[in-house]
Image: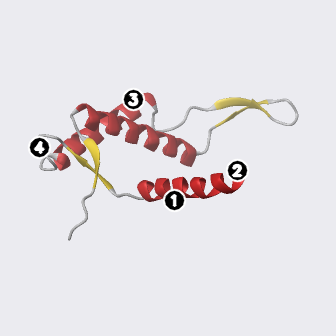
Amino acid sequence: MARLVLPRLALVLAALSAAACTPMRLEHPTFGTSRLDQDAAECDDLARREAMRFMPILPPPRLVRDRRGRAVWVRPSFSEWEMERWHQEREVSRICLASRGYRLVPVEPKP
C-alpha cells in the first residue's frame, strides 16, 4: 500500500510545484493592462496613506523592565516596523486593485 502512495504523492507534489512557478500578471477583464500603470499608482498612493495613518513613521515606545526591575522605555527595531508597514501597504494595494476589477492571470508564453 505504501508503495502506491509514495509515487502518487510525488506526482501530486511535482504538479503543484510546477503550478506554483507559473508567472502571473494583473489584468482587467475589460481594459486588459492598458490602465494598469495608472490604477496601480493610485492604489499605491492610497495604500501608503492608509499605512501611514495606522502605522506612523516611528514606532511607539514600549515600557519594559530591565534586569534590576526598573522601568525603561524602548523602541522596537525600525527595520521590523518598516517591514510591517510595507506588508500593510502591499495588502491594501492588492485589495484596491482587486476592487477595481483586476485579477491575477497566468502569463501566456510567447511562441
Q: Position of residue 12 (x, y in %)?
A: 52, 53
Q: Callout 4, which amino acid?
A: Phe
Residue type at mark 3: give it. Arg
Quarter of the image for the C terminus: give it. Answer: bottom left
Q: CA distance from mark 4 to mark 3?
A: 32 Å
Relative to the observer, which residue lies in front, 81 or 19? 19
For label 2, the residue is 1
Amino acid of disc 2: Met
Mark 1, Cα crowd under 10 Å, few <14 / some 14-19 / many 20+, is few
Name the N-terminal-most of marks 1 and 2: 2
Pointer 4 local density, CA inside 10 Å: few below 14, some 14–19, many at least 20: few
- The residue labelled by disc 1 is 14
Q: For numbered disc 3, what is the local secondary structure? A: helix
93 horizontally vs 15: left or right: left
* Element at label 1: helix
Looking at the image, tell me whether mark 2 or mark 3 is earlier in sequence order. 2
Marks 2, 3: nearer the viewer:
2
Which-is-in-front pick, marks 3 and 1?
Answer: 1
Distance from label 2 to label 3 (Cα)? 57 Å
Label 4 secondary element: loop
Furthest toward the front, the residue is: 1
Q: Earlier in the sequence, mark 1 or mark 4?
A: 1
Q: What residue is rendered at 33% in x and 34% in y?
A: 95
Residue holding disc 4: 31
Is the C-beta separation of discs 1 and 4 under 8 Å?
no
Q: Are marks 2 and 4 in contact (CB under 8 Å)?
A: no
User: Which of the two marks, 1 or 2, is nearer to us in this view?
Assistant: 2
Closer to the chain start, of discs 2 and 4, is: 2
Q: Outermost residue, right direction?
A: 68
Q: Residue at x 37, y 57 (%)?
A: 22
* Mark number, residue 53: 3
